[in-house]
Amino acid sequence: MLSTGQKIRRGFHWLAAILAAILLSVGLALMTFDVSDFWHGGEGDTPVGIGDLLLGAIGLLFACWVLWAAVRALGWIVVRLYRRFEADKLNAA
């Protein structure tokens, strides 16, 4: 049986993973659209090289990791505040 804090942490873990996956899929779709637009004759575009794509993919992965870590940190704060609230409620009784 999971405690309430563990359930909250698990929920924030899932939320973080889902948000990071959404960011990754949207970012990859936008990168793909940009490259395909270039290859189909977009005028005034600069050439897109493999290094540019690799740098964009690394930046996108870093952004996903930062989003995941921020949501997990928010979950950690919520669990700490919940535990403090529960302790104060028990001490007041």
Image (tube, rainbow, N blue to C red):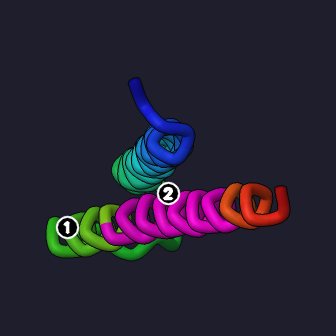
Q: Which mark is residue 69?
A: none
Cα separation between marks 2 and 1: 21 Å
Q: Position of residue 85 (x, y in %)?
A: 74, 62
Which badge, 2 or 1, is on the more N-terminal residue? 2
| Residue on which the image places disc 1 | 54
Residue 67 in the figure: left or right of residue 64: right
What amino acid is found at the position of numbered circle 2 in the picture? Gly
Question: What's drawn in magenta, residue-wise?
Answer: 62-84
Label 2 with label 1: CB-CB less than 8 Å: no
Q: Residue at x 20, y 67 (%)?
A: 54
Q: In the rendering, at what x and y percent does residue 18 appear?
A: 48, 39
Q: Residue at x 66, y 67 (%)?
A: 84
* Amino acid tagged 1: Leu
Verify whether residue 26 appears in magenta.
no
Of badges 2 and 1, nearer the viewer stands 1
Q: Which quadrant would residue 31 be assigned to in this image?
A: bottom left
